Image (tube, helix red, strand yellow):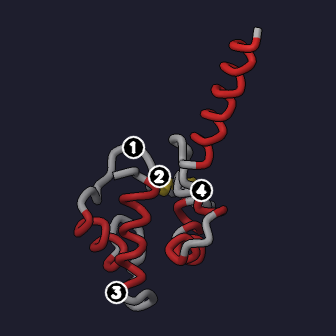
Amino acid sequence: MPRAKLFAVVVFAAIGLAGCFGGGGRYMIGESKAYEASLYRQNCAICHGPEGDGKTLDDGTRVPSLREGEFKAKTENQIYDQIANGGNGMVGFRRQLSEREMRLLVELVKRDLRGQ
């Protein structure tokens, strides 16, 4: 019986530690205090949704998910170009955001939302 208790303690401890070290959890923009998450909430969430899952606008336009699906902008340079210059219905942010801020958003999309 003591081995069973020890095993249970070890299993629960492992599960708890996995949760602490990002055991495959989804990056949550709304919970992040990172500057780039704040940039996303201020500039991107209105169209792409609060967590980047995409959404349908009031006029029926379907804005794509930044997390999954087929992406037109795949490389860092393509994502940067899309953010800076817009296109396909999206406005460009070259005049609203600094170079650094646009690069931070590229990283947020690639690393945190797409896991690349």
Residue 102 at least partly seen: yes
Q: Determine contact: label 1, label 2, CB under 8 Å.
A: yes
Q: Determine contact: label 3, label 4, CB under 8 Å.
A: no
In the picture, the quarter occupied by the N terminus is top right
Q: Amino acid at mark 2?
A: Ser
Q: Amino acid at mark 4?
A: Met
Residue that label 4 marks: 28
Mark sitting earlier along the chain (3/4)? 4
Mark sitting earlier along the chain (3/2)? 2
* Mark 2 secondary-structure assignment: loop
* Mark 3 secondary-structure assignment: helix
Tell me if mark 2 has few (under 14), some (14-19) or many (20+) residues whose alpha carbon lies within 10 angstroms of its own. Answer: some
Residue 32: % across, % down = 61, 65
Tell me if mark 3 has few (under 14), some (14-19) or many (20+) residues whose alpha carbon lies within 10 angstroms of its own. Answer: few
> For residue 69, which numbered disc appears in the image?
1
Separation (CA) of disc 3 from disc 4: 24 Å
Q: Amino acid at mark 1?
A: Gly
Residue 101: % across, % down = 42, 82
Residue that label 3 marks: 99
Instruction: Please tell me whether residue 82 is drawn above or below residue 92 in the rendered image.
Output: above
Instruction: Please tell me whether residue 107 is drawn above or below residue 66 in the rendered image.
Output: below
Residue that label 2 marks: 65
Residue 3: % across, % down = 69, 13
Mark sitting earlier along the chain (1/4)? 4
